[in-house]
Image (spheres, coloured by chain):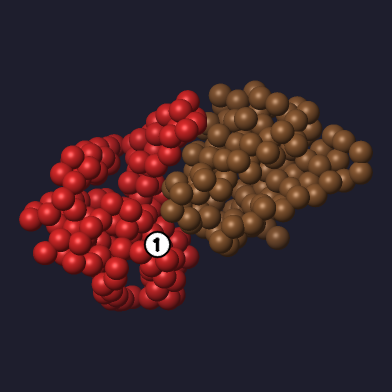
Chain colours: A red, B brown
Amino acid sequence: MEAHLQLSFEPMWPNVREIRQQVGTALEACPEQLRNAAIMTSSELVENAVKYGESVPAAKTVTFQLEVTADLLSIRVVNGSTNAPGVAELQRRVAELHGAQDKQALYLARLEELLIQADESGKLGIYRIGFEGGFDLQLDYTNDVVSVTATRNPNA
Amino acid sequence: MPEQKWQFEQDGLIINASRTNTRGTVAWCGVSDSRTPAVFLRPVLRDLSEKMKGAEVTVDFTKLEYMNSATVSPLINFVKTLDGTCTRILVLFAQTDWQRTHLQCMRAIATTLRHTQVDSAPPS
């Protein structure tokens, strides 16, 4: 199956739920497992963009793009950010996921940290995308624009 | 003790709880996708932990349709707190694919908990 969805929106929280609905509709013909993985991944990436993104000259709004072909499912979320240390931390987690042989172990290790430090939250979504969603992630940061791309084989 | 019931609700998430003398249930329904779910969940779950003290408790996630990753920390810490104050905890997940992943993780975590068992509920 093939599908395409492209949206631009203000970084406002209600748009996260809207994205999940639109991705669910776009992937109605897909198997449930793949659809759920794409919905969760889209939601987590858009949450990050809404939480940490800001309007910059090269990215005034958040951009979301979903592409499905016979052999690739790709989700890209683009937002502005002048918080270079914050983006570096995100980049570190993306690289950690990209290089991980055992994505479940990465996710579980973070859960164990959260169990020990109950007041902490967050920094779990990137690992969830890799483990639960089965996606690989790549991040580009140029001219204050963060572009995160999640890809997976739709037939896997 | 007659059965007592409580309901907590916020923006699509409903938590129904009940307690008799020896047994309690905490059932999550709907969607937990707020920006900071811990702000709503932490006081609610702290309150429920008190209400469930000393009981055999079933924590039922089978009607939870979606949760964001920010929900996971308050959720697992709720189960950990119950494990310390209740006689037995049964955590139930549905057999849908996204819940299976959380079942696996909760099972792995439960190996460090003394009174908690994690299981999948039969399809309804």
> In this image, A114 relative to A75: left or right?
right
Vertical position of residue A39 compared to residue B26: above or below: below
**Residue in the picture at 43% in, 39% down:** A121
Vertical position of residue B80 compared to residue A151: above or below: above
Assess disc 1: are there few (<14), some (14-19) or many (≥20) residues with their C-alpha within 10 Å of its C-alpha. some
**Residue in the picture at 19% in, 58% down:** A80
Quarter location, residue B114: top right
> In this image, A109 relative to B26: left or right?
left
Where disc 1 sits, the SS reads: loop
Please identify the quadrant where the N terminus of chain A is shown: bottom left
**Residue in the picture at 92% in, 44% down:** B2
> In this image, B36 relative to A90: left or right?
right
Vertical position of residue A58 compared to residue B98: above or below: below
Numbered label tally: 1
Q: Which residue is mark 1?
A: A13
**Residue in the picture at 56% in, 61% down:** B11
Place of residue A77 in the rendered image (x, y in percent of width and height, measured from the top left):
25, 61
**What subunit carries mark 1?**
A
Residue A50 vs residue A21, the one in the foreground:
A50
Place of residue A72 in the rendered image (x, y in percent of width and height, measured from the top left):
25, 64
Vertical position of residue A123 compared to residue A152: above or below: above
Residue type marked 1? Trp
